[in-house]
Amino acid sequence: MSAEYVLEMKNITKRYGENTVLSDVSLSVRPGEIHALLGENGAGKSTLMNVLFGMPVIHTTGGFEGQVLLDGETANVTSPHDAMVKGIGMVHQEFMLLPGFTVTENIKLNRETTHPNIVSRILGKNLETLDMEAMAADARKALDSVGMSIDEHTLVEGMPVGYMQFVEIAREIDKTGVKLLVFDEPTAVLTESEATQLVSVMKQIAANGIAIIFITHRLDEVMAAADSITILRDGKLAATREKAKTSVVELAELMIGRKGESMVEADPRTAPQDKVAMSIRDLYVDMPGEEVRGVTLDVYEGEILGIGGLAGQGKLGIPNGVMSLYDTQGSVTLFGEPLKLGNAGDALRAGIAMVSEDRKGVGLLLDQSIEDNIVFNAMQIKGEYLHKVGFFTLKDGGAVRRTADKMIRDLDIRCFGPMQHAGTLSGGNQQKVCIARALVMDPRFLFVSEPTRGIDIGAKKLVLETLLRLNREQGMTIVIVSSELQELKSISDRIAIISEGKLVDILSPNASDADFGLAMSGIKPGDQLEKGDDAQ
Amino acid sequence: MTKSKTQRIIAILLAVAAVALIALGAIHMPQRSAQGGRDILDALRIRTLLNATGEGVVESYVAIAKQEASNKAREEGLGMSALREAVAKAEEEARAQHTGTSVDYDTVNTDELVSALESYTAALSAYYRTADAAQQAYIEEHMPEAEAAAEAEREAKLAAGQEVSEDEEVTVDMSGFVATEEMNALMAKADEAYLAVGEALKGIYPVLDDAALETLHDTIQGIVYQSGDDFTAQYDRYMEAGSGAAVSNTTTAFFIRYADDLIYCGVALALAALALLFSRSLVEKLGIPRIIISLFFILLCLLALLYDLSLPTLLSNSVVRMGMNAIMVLAMVPGIQCGISLNLGLPIGLVAGLIGGLMTIEYGIPGWGGFLFAIAVGSVIAAVAGWLYGLLLNRLKGEEMSVTTYVGFSIVSVMCIAWLVLPFTSLKLRWPLGTGLRNTIGLDSSNFKHILDDLLSFSIGDFTVPTGLILFMLLCCFLVWLFSRSRTGVAMQAVGNNPRFAEATGISVDRMRIVGTVLSTVLGAVGILVYSQSYGFMQLYTAPRQMGFIAASAILIGGASTSRCKISHVIIGTFLFQGVLTLGMPVANMLVPGTTLSETLRILISNGIILYALTKSGGGSRA
């Protein structure tokens, strides 16, 4: 180990077509250190790791610019297998284990210890006999080094999630010659005690001279485990820090940063706080990947409430839960009346409308016309846009067309006409159709979930302006859920930050980036300040 | 050169060729009945006549030579073998002497023969006109008898449990026909004219005697005129006889003969040019499979014309078959709309409809009452069965295609047992011996056979319009269209289109799927009754098994996908599918006579289309 760094990535730039996802990013990891890689969703962490592992997705899209050095020598990693050979291992976020195999078999998969037999001498190496005893011994050693007492002959199937994570780590450690391990959000699925144990295991591994890249967004874990920290933001290197010389607040600030100028300027005003429009109590939502675990929240009449947080933390679960799109528990009161949970129709009838984050999956009838999409809810829930012809109650084509034309004008939906299929529209215009459908319902309360995801900048501006106008001119209460903090800041009166399915805090849009950064990693800014005060 | 430019140039070249062909055909077509055509026919006729007579003359010379040789040998008292040798030698010599040298076609004076022939042809055609008319009258007079006999035979076959073939043509036995007075008189006139022809021939071939002329009578008559002769038939006959050399301008003659085919080819080229020119927008609007099938259909129409098949009759049959099948195809619509994809379990509905039909016959309800009763009973059974079927499908979401197929097959098998044990007592339905229902149950005028087909039907030439059938089809289409615009219909389509969207609006996905399944099954029941009334039979046991697939492929040809369809897809698809089959069979039989190619074609087309549609069912087809 003559070189100072086991891994150096120098000036990495990666473009997907016109889109630059990494620009001039450098990362250096010393042997035996735990190096945290911090960043919001989409900051470029995954892309950087894809470059490191030589993933096909990088090569097939034109490669990357920059240099990767292993032990001071230029390395050209061509494939994940090549990365393995060169001593780089990965502990995956989704477990790559075979449930029907034992722990030993999983650890030694494709690297089995074998000895030759008669058949293999004739037909080749693939038919050699497995040396189960040697393999079990190896597995035992690896398991011991991650502090796991579990029997190496246990089946992976039915193991607690935390154990699987450790088996995964044991597998990487067992690989001979491994000098760098990447942990991709390993604590996301672990309980607190398991997470603590993981951190200690990581330290133990690092003490054996193996370097670790620790990808996470939990700032307290970073502070607990890491030696040095690299922070990415918007595909750029935000900063590199030694742990000793930084603080949680600084990290939070660096992670969030200030991105661009706000697109929409709301007139400053004092947020209305006199009447509660919706009060949510102990909301639990079983939405896969966005679970809500007990949120209590009041929304005031006439305000725009932003709900923010990192992806997968449960912010999307709130509107989906209130609209009963997933199994939901808890109680919701709307304008003083209890809302029955369990049927989306009830929520719609009560006067709540929602613009879903999943436009293509939930938000639109892609194969049907714009006008049918716009009036669908009003027709089904309120029985509007229907007229009687003889014995039949039929769609009132004329009324539908008039409303559709009006909405196309008002929201500037770019299309060939109201008969065009929704599926052929661009993302921004599809979003406008979704908003139009919500508006045709004349809602008293509007949920807007990720309204600007995947749409171009002009459409973004128009969507946000429309929401602002609805709120200011019609007094509509709006809850906007978004991963884009800047967007929330620009139009919200208050911003609730959700982390791990729970409400962390409700912040003013003028709060500092550090506050938002802390809140997003689950630390209530007030608490941290108190701690900080104590420390000082 | 860009692709589109090349395409345009080829299209223009094709168009030019097409115009040339059509012009050529159009110019020469009227020649057939004008002087030019007559001249060609006359020249050919004389040459054929002279050839045929010449052969007769040679035979006469040979006969004479042989007789002489034989006589001479006998006088010389030669032995048997020497005699035979001498005769053979004489025959050879006579043949060598006379063959080919008998008449010089260019110098012989045929004026007399031409005028004699003209009057003979006129006399013959007058005779045949009268004879045809008389025979037609006889056929019309005896048709009912023949039909009754055929029906009786069919009944007998059914009773014996034999298969009855479809669309068998009824023929009148002509053995009882006697020539009329008028015919005899005309025949006598023709015979007189023939004598004049004989005289003229004698002028050219002096060796001909009356006996030879007598033997030549039939041949000459055949050459001059046959019943129903038109230009092409005569031309072909003369050419076959090897008289082509008589025509001075062979190209013109060829063009006149093939004038109609030239026009057909021209039209085909013009269509090809149009298709090429607008290929892009056509592909966008219709999709490649529909274009291929349409072009195939047009090709079949042109082939039918080329092979001189009666296109109006074939098209009329296509329309009837469209009406027969359209409602079963329509049954696919609610299925696709509610998200169970192609309802290949259609046999459930078919079986329900068949039970309705059987009950009508069992209770002997005649006419419209019976038909409506059958529809009502069938629909009720179908609704109940469809509801249960819908419950099943709701438990097996995502696997509809295989589940519906299995259900379709299973219900047919279950009913194979049920048909044997159902307590129907009517002798029209049961086997004469033992228990169980017959394989094929013939409908007659006392039930609802052709009740829709014959309603208000009228004919234009060979084209019969089954007004009632078409109206009923349009009525059903209209009702389904109305339903698709109702609140429930809109909700149902949303469920099919995007179940999660529907759920987000509080619509019960399961309930809407059941609504769609029930509707589809009921339409299946109505569909099989319409089919049966037109077909004239109700087929039980394994007959309904394939019908689901046929209906599915028809709607897919029409442009539907497994998740999207419109009423227009039903009508276009059924017409194209049934049209291709109706035209394909006779054309295939002309192309490759005496094979079952057409049946193979049908299976290939229907299954191939389903397969193609499945490859596209992943989505993205928003044509």
Image (cartoon, coloured by chain):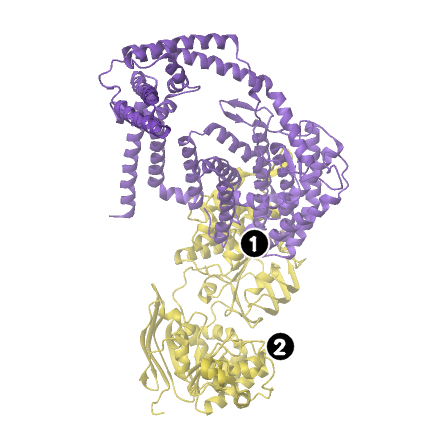
Chain colours: A yellow, B purple
* Of A167 and B416, the residue lying toward us: B416
Q: Which residue is mark 2?
A: A158
Camera-near label (2 vs 1) is 2
Residue farthest along the front direction in this orientation: B77
Amino acid tagged 1: Phe
* Of B353 and B197, the residue lying toward us: B197
Cα distance between the residues tagged 2 and 1: 35 Å
The structure residue drawn at horizontal position 36% and vertical position 39%, both measured from the top left corner, is B275
* Of A497 and A392, the residue lying toward us: A392
The structure residue drawn at horizontal position 35% and vertical position 89%, both measured from the top left corner, is A4
- Assess disc 2: are there few (<14), some (14-19) or many (≥20) residues with their C-alpha within 10 Å of its C-alpha: few
Q: Is residue A458 above or below residue B484?
A: below
**Residue B602: where, in percent of width, then height?**
51, 43
Q: Secondary structure at mark 1?
A: helix
- Assess disc 1: are there few (<14), some (14-19) or many (≥20) residues with their C-alpha within 10 Å of its C-alpha: many
* Of B211 and A397, the residue lying toward us: B211
- Chain hosting mark 1: B
Q: Secondary structure at mark 2?
A: loop
Image-based side of A103 in relation to B123, left or right: right
- Chain hosting mark 2: A
Q: Which residue is mark 1?
A: B501
Residue B395 in view: yes
**Residue A127: where, in percent of width, then height?**
49, 81
Residue B56 in view: no
The structure residue drawn at horizontal position 58% and vertical position 78%, both measured from the top left corner, is A161
**Residue B208: where, in percent of width, then height?**
33, 14
